[in-house]
Image (cartoon, grey):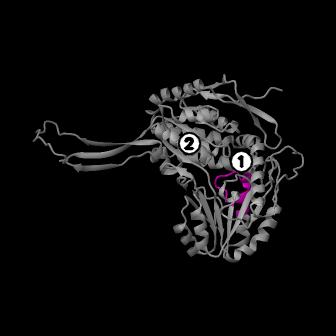
Amino acid sequence: MSIRKVPMLIDGQEVLSDSGQWLDVLNPATQEVVAQVPFATLDEVELAVASAKQAFATWRHVSLAKRQQFLLAFLQLVRDNTSYIAELITLEHGKTLPDAEGEVGRGIEAIENACLITKLQLGEVADNVAGNVNVYTLNKPLGVGVGITAFNFPVMLPCFMFPIAIACGNTFVLKPSEQDPSATLLLAQLAWQAGLPAGVLNVVHGGADVANYLAEHQDVKALSFIGSTHVGTALYQRASQAGIRAQCMMGAKNHCVVMPDANKEQAINHLLGSCFGAAGQRCMANSVAILVGAARDWLPEIVAKAKTMTVDAGTNCAADLGPLVSPQAKQRVQSLIAAGVEQGATLLLDGRDPKVSGYPQGNFVAPTIFSDVSTTMDIYTQEIFGPVMCVLTADSLHDAIDIINANPNGNGTSIFTSSGWHARHFENHVDVGQIGINIPIPVPVAYFSFTGSRASKLGDLGPNGQQAVQFWTQTHTVSARWFEPDAAAGQMNTTITMK
């Protein structure tokens, strides 16, 4: 049986790469090869950028209303195809179908926000700031934008990028993860089906060579990246040195504080769902639990509840978590679990090599829980990106906040409490971008901006919300005076004063 080859999308056409390097895309539950994705040649990437640059000359002048109409049509197509998109996500990523459908739903939120472009892209005006002078701002598109996305959200992450970018009048080149490209490609195909002109959205595949080429290209004006800290830092430096505006949302080590006054059952359920959902492959997963005061006595119940979670292929809608994305990811997670044991943490629940009926080759790791974790251990200092929870204890909320703020990352954090004072104290003293109060995964709705901080983010402006419009536009400030017909010229003014 022939293996499906994933095409690129360049200048309104599906293009099969001439590359001699192709990567097998595997079903994480079975190791079956479900597709092959190319590492595009740099000539092919150049064609995509050139197409986007050419399309920008006309797309930038398309009215806000027409851009909005396109986005509304695109939005409906994504809604109509939610189930099929989710199936592709599960096939190549491994997450459960309900989780995949939830991802598509969060992507739809971002598209819905982009549909508000007729309001979001408004400027400001001041009337009669001096004699017959008005000053106003215009939010103009930048040009060619680039998006580079991670494997863990092949639909949501692109939706954080290209819908709002093209809504603002830019054109786009998207490089999805080579590990699970098909759902991302379908998203772009639906954009074309909705009537997007050729060249406005292009898709190329590849690894570091393609990403680096795009990050330094003289015709690229802005780059958005979501992925690992190592890659994001390197791309940010390359783009900045090339004069390209960049935003890089990167690694995390998220903490969930559980206060003894929290609703115990709700807190435990949300903590486990946040840490172990998607097999822990979320940059917003709360992989560190800080049990404050008497909440440390809940640890046996946390472990007991984790033991009941179902590990299976993502096509089992009753599963709580599916496989990791690749054998390499599984090997890395297992090696970090071994390091935790060697460095003295107590392994309360060992999820290595679970037996999943019917899927002996799957990349499965079951929920794993460590106690007696110190902040110097590898399982704490590294982002595991697997279903592994590190449990710390603290005597007070103040001590818990100190632990969080001492960690270099600042992506997300949560607190479970029934005390408004505790919640308010937490939000005012913790140095983290996204804060959840009785919310386990505090990714904000798309009309608010994603606001990671410290080592989790490079760039001043984040995806989504009003910050995204600022990122994908440049401000032109216009000062204008119109003289009355036949008005006297008046005197020459050689000062800076506006009269």
Q: Helix, strand, or loop for circle 1? A: helix
Q: Residue at (64%, 24%) from the top-left corner?
A: 15
Q: Which amino acid does label 1 sit on?
A: Ala
Q: Report the residue marked by disc 2.
A: 234
Query: Which mark is first along the chain, 1 or 2?
Result: 1
Image-quadrant location for residue 484? top left
State the residue in front, 98 or 212. 212
Residue 274 x %, y %: 69, 59
311 vs 160, left or right, is: right
Q: Report the residue marked by disc 1.
A: 100
Please count the marks in the image: 2
Q: Residue at (74%, 50%) from the top-left corner?
A: 98
Residue 41 visible in the snapshot: yes
Residue 407 x %, y %: 59, 61
Image-quadrant location for residue 381? bottom right
C-beta proximity under 8 Å, tags 2 and 1: no
Image-quadrant location for residue 480? top left
Q: Give the range drawn in magenta.
A: 271-287
